[in-house]
Image: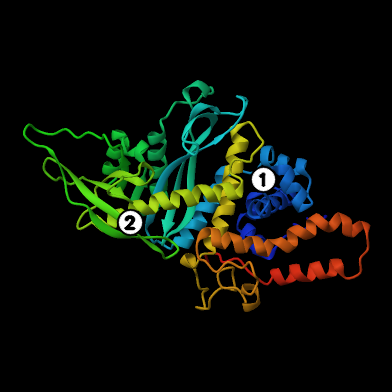
């Protein structure tokens, strides 16, 4: 009986993470393609298309496409494994849950669920595809959770049913609760804050929330009652990089102050610039003036970072038209995203003996941090920058290998392999 060969190695850092998913792939070639896609998405390739990743990895583009579109691995099982890793990393800790939709421009109408619709990223109607996303924030570090594609009425397929974005968001929250995740508070923009069904569902699920509302948001008032504004108060908005900026907040009181409260936030109380002024609604309790300002400000700041991260990893770079393949691509992006998130000190773990895990990108050996481009920040993008530095020798070696096989330059290839070996001394920080 012939023994199955081992999967080709890439970089230890990625290989260790990929091993957590290995049993989900039916054969060694599929698992190798999974690793190639992870490395390609994490690398600093400008576009993360399958041909670009195949070229950078020295792989075959058709093989990568086959794994994405046809290979018999289950996207649902991959998602379950990823969410299990998130649970292990959280170790029972509650977190802030963000709900948001993201859209990307796509030409034509051959791609499933692409339609002329509002694309939030662009702030206008465009031809594109939209998803509703749930992601978490723990100590200002983001991590991916779930997503659902929005299916426009005009593009429904047999067996589909139309669901609004707020309805999809409720399904995401319920699914995460069924998994056992715990939320400190739910954050969402005005699309969801203006949905009475969405807010009602949050109330029925006994969840705390801070949601945006429109400036003309209406509340029914009994006769003789009116809308009042408290005086503007300043507070210091704390950002993930440790910096602070002054913000202003005041409360809107519709008649008698109730359990649900309303606030007006801005960066400039005189000019009220529309791009940095928000109306919000919350059921948080107690002295929440500063808390609610920082909490909702976290949503608007992290939202940008989350979308930027998806762009960095190639969320919209798929070149497939059926949603089954698109869903696989998006799930692979989430797997790559989680690998970076897990390297944060927020998710630091000790092994059973109490000893810290091996050196990672957030606590590298001294020589690594001496690299002129090494990023000492602790944010998600800072970690990604360092991950890309670690991957560089392997990616460059793959790109140059055809020349090295053609021209024998003594010591050149050996030097590359030695540098790759040094990179392999860094290990992935993973939940135990």
Q: In the image as oriented, which residue stretches furthest toward the left? A: 224
The residue where tag 1 is placed is 47
Residue 114's label in the rendered image is none
Res. 294 mark: 2
Residue at 85% x, 66% y: name it: 413
* Residue 379 as seen in the image, left or right of residue 223: right
Q: CA distance from mark 2 to mark 1?
A: 35 Å
- In percent of width and height, residue 119 lies at 49, 34
Indicate the position of residue 56 as horizontal and vertical percent values: 75, 52
Q: Nearer the viewer, residue 312 or 62?
A: 312
Q: In the displayed structure, would residue 204 be above or below residue 141?
A: above
Residue 117 drawn at (x, y percent): 49, 28
Q: Residue at x 42, y 56 (%)?
A: 137
| SS at badge 2 | helix
Q: Residue at x 55, y 48 (%)?
A: 310
Q: Nearer the viewer, residue 269 or 16?
A: 269
Which numbered disc, 2 or 1, marks the residue that appears first in the sequence? Answer: 1
| Residue 259 image point, x, y percent | 18, 47
| Any part of residue 78 in sight | no
**Residue 393: in sight, yes or no?**
yes
Q: What secondary structure is marked by label 1?
A: loop
- Does residue 313 lie above or below 380 as drawn? above
Q: Residues within 10 Å of mark 1 (few under 14, many from 20)?
A: some
């Amino acid at each position: 009986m012939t023994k199955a060969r081992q999967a080709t190695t890439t970089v230890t850092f990625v290989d260790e993470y990929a091993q957590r998913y290995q049993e989900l792939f039916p054969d060694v070639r599929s698992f190798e393609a999974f690793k190639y896609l992870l490395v390609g998405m994490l690398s600093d390739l400008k576009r993360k298309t399958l041909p670009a990743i195949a070229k950078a990895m020295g792989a075959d583009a058709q093989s990568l496409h086959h794994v994405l579109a046809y290979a018999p691995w289950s996207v649902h099982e991959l998602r379950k494994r990823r969410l299990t890793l998130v649970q292990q990393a959280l170790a029972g800790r509650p977190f802030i849950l963000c709900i948001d939709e993201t859209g990307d421009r796509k030409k034509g109408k051959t791609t499933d669920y692409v339609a002329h619709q509002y694309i939030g990223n662009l702030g206008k109607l465009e031809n594109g595809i939209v998803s509703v996303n749930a992601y978490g924030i723990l100590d200002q570090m983001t991590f991916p959770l779930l997503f659902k594609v929005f299916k426009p009425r005009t593009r429904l397929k047999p067996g589909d049913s139309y669901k609004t974005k707020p309805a999809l968001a409720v399904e995401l929250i319920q699914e995460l609760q069924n998994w056992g995740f715990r939320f400190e508070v739910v954050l969402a923009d005005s699309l969801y804050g203006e949905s009475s069904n969405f807010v009602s569902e949050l109330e029925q699920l006994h969840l705390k929330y801070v949601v945006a509302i429109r400036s003309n948001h209406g509340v029914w008032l009994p006769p003789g009652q009116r809308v009042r504004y408290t005086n503007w108060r300043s507070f210091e908005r704390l950002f993930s990089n440790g910096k602070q900026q002054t913000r202003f907040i005041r409360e809107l009181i519709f008649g008698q102050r109730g359990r649900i409260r309303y606030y007006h936030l801005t960066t400039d109380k005189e000019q009220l610039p529309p791009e940095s002024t928000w109306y919000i609604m919350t059921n948080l309790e107690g002295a929440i003036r500063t808390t609610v300002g920082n909490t909702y400000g976290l949503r608007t700041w992290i939202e940008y970072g989350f979308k930027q991260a998806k762009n960095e990893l190639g969320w919209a770079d798929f070149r497939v038209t059926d949603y089954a393949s698109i869903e696989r691509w998006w799930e692979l992006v989430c797997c790559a995203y989680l690998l970076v998130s897990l390297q944060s000190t927020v998710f630091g773990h000790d092994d059973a003996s109490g000893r810290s895990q091996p050196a990672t990108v957030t606590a590298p050996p001294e020589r690594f941090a001496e690299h002129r481009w090494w990023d000492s920040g602790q944010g998600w993008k800072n970690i990604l920058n360092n991950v890309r530095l670690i991957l560089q020798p392997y990616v460059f070696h793959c790109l140059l290998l055809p020349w090295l096989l053609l021209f024998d330059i003594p010591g050149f290839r050996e030097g590359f392999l030695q540098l790759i070996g040094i990179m392999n001394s860094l290990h992935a920080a993973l939940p135990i």
